[in-house]
Each structure stands twice: as C-alpha cells, then as structure tokens.
Image (cartoon, helix red, strand yellow):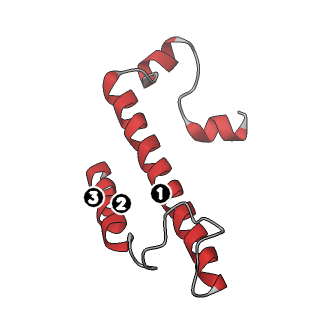
Amino acid sequence: MVIVWIAISVFYTYFTKNDIGDIPSNCPPDYPYSEPKLRLACIMRTANYVIMWTYTSLLIIFLISVLSGVLPQEEDMKKKGKDFNIKTVVEGV
C-alpha cells in the first residue's frame, strides 16, 4: 500500500505541476498574476504539495522504523506488563 501511495503522489505531482501555468511554486507576491485568485490558488497548491509529501515522508519513516525493529513489538509490551491494545489505552482501563 505504501508503494501505491508513493506512486499516486509522484503521478499527482507530475501531472499537476503546471496546472495553473508557469507560476513559480513559491508564489511570490510581486509576480504578475493575471487574476488575484491565481495567487491564492498557487498558495493552496503549494500547501497541498507540502502536506502530501510530508505525509508520504512520515509514512516512509514509519515503514522503515517498523521493518528495522525500532518500534516496540507486542511481545515487548507484554513483557513490561503493558497492554498493547489501543482501545485499552484510549479508554484508560
């Protein structure tokens, strides 16, 4: 599923990079926008890319952490006497 998400992110970025023309991705205020709404669209596009790639990066870091054994396993939690069930943690039981 991670590979699918990365592929979607790459394709989405590739196919939408010029969706509002040749406006720079940093959305400079002194750029000659043909309409004022284009700057807002540029800012929203940049925020979208930042959030999407931040999520993708965190997903990759989490996957690497799981595969490398950095995160505690269920057996480790049982040895420490802690419940691994998230429902128990949320309800405070």
Q: Are marks 2 and 1 in contact (CB under 8 Å)?
A: yes
Q: How far across and how far down the image is residue 73, in percent?
A: 42, 23
Numbered disc 1: secondary structure: helix
Q: Residue furthest top?
A: 79
Amino acid type at image mark 2: Ser
Q: Nearer the viewer, residue 21 or 92?
A: 21
Measure how far apart labels 2 and 3 are at the Cα level.
5 Å
Q: Earlier in the sequence, mark 2 or mark 1?
A: 2
Q: How far across and how far down the image is residue 2, in percent?
A: 32, 49
Amino acid type at image mark 1: Met
Q: Residue furthest right?
A: 92
Q: Nearer the viewer, residue 33 or 42?
A: 33
Q: Are marks 2 and 3 in contact (CB under 8 Å)?
A: yes
Measure how far apart labels 2 and 1 are at the Cα level.
7 Å
Measure how far apart labels 1 and 3 are at the Cα level.
12 Å
Determine which quarter of the picture holds residue 85: top right
The image shows residue 56, relative to residue 38, as above or below, that is above
Q: How many C-alpha atoms fall within 10 Å of the one at disc 1: few (<14), some, or many (≥20)?
A: some
Amino acid type at image mark 3: Ala
Q: Nearer the viewer, residue 72 or 20?
A: 20
Identified at 59% across, 72% down, the residue is: 31
Q: What residue does disc 1 label?
A: 52
As drawn, the label of residue 7 is 3
Q: How far across and how far down the image is residue 68, in percent?
A: 32, 23
Q: How many C-alpha atoms fall within 10 Å of the one at disc 3: few (<14), some, or many (≥20)?
A: few
Q: Are marks 1 and 3 in contact (CB under 8 Å)?
A: no
As drawn, the label of residue 27 is none
Q: How many C-alpha atoms fall within 10 Å of the one at disc 2: few (<14), some, or many (≥20)?
A: some
Identified at 49% across, 12% down, the residue is: 79
Q: What residue does disc 2 label?
A: 9
Q: Earlier in the sequence, mark 1 or mark 3?
A: 3
